[in-house]
Image: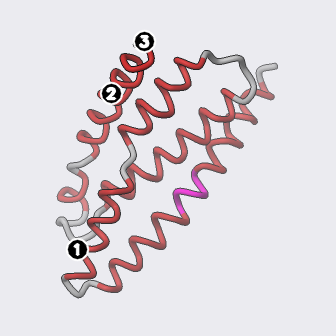
Amino acid sequence: MLRFFVISLGGAIGTLLRYLVGGLDYRFSSGVFPISTLVVNVTGSLAIGFMWGIVDRFAVSPNTRLFIFIGILGGYTTFSTFSLETFNLMRDGEYRIALMNVFLSFILSIAAVFAGYFISKTLLNLYK
């Protein structure tokens, strides 16, 4: 039962963070390019790589892992929104923007996981 609470609490935090970032589309791209989803997925990828580097080194309880990875980061990042936005861009004939969205989302998110992991490992090695 504690697992459900831990995941739910983390999910609520991640969802609220996602909502706060959601306004970026209209502030920075007039709603044309789904910048907030890109930012969420890249920063979420950076965070998951960074946190995995820490968890890889220290003993972290299963409930803490659930809270961080499934709860917070699962609630924060959103592949389904990315998919819908890409679909809508293609449906509207914005093929170039849709392709740019796919390319940037995949490349930057994967690069961010690597970066987060190596940043955490570097920081941990500095403070041995």
Q: Which residue is mark 1?
A: 88
Q: Residue, x 48% and y 73% (percent of image)?
A: 103
How far across and how far down the image is residue 43, in percent? 46, 46
Residue 125 position by quadrant: top right
Q: Is residue 91 above or below residue 72?
A: below
Q: State which quarter of the image contains the N terminus.
A: top left
Dot 2 or dot 1: first in sequence order is 2
Q: Which residue is mark 3?
A: 2
Q: Amino acid at mark 3?
A: Leu
How far across and how far down the image is residue 70, in percent? 46, 33
Circle 2 residues within 10 Å: few <14, some 14–19, many ≥20: some
Q: Which residue is mark 2?
A: 13
Dot 1 or dot 3: first in sequence order is 3
- Judged from the image, the secondary structure of the residue bearing numbered disc 1 is helix
Q: Amino acid at mark 1?
A: Asn
Dot 3 or dot 2: first in sequence order is 3
- Taking the view exactly as shown, the residue that stands out farthest to the top is 2
Name the side, left or right, on which 94 lies relative to 74. Answer: left
Is residue 28 located in the magenta-colored stretch of the structure?
Answer: no
Q: Residue, x 27% and y 67% (percent of image)?
A: 85
What range of the chain is rendered magenta?
A: 108-112
Name the side, left or right, on which 57 lies relative to 111. Answer: right
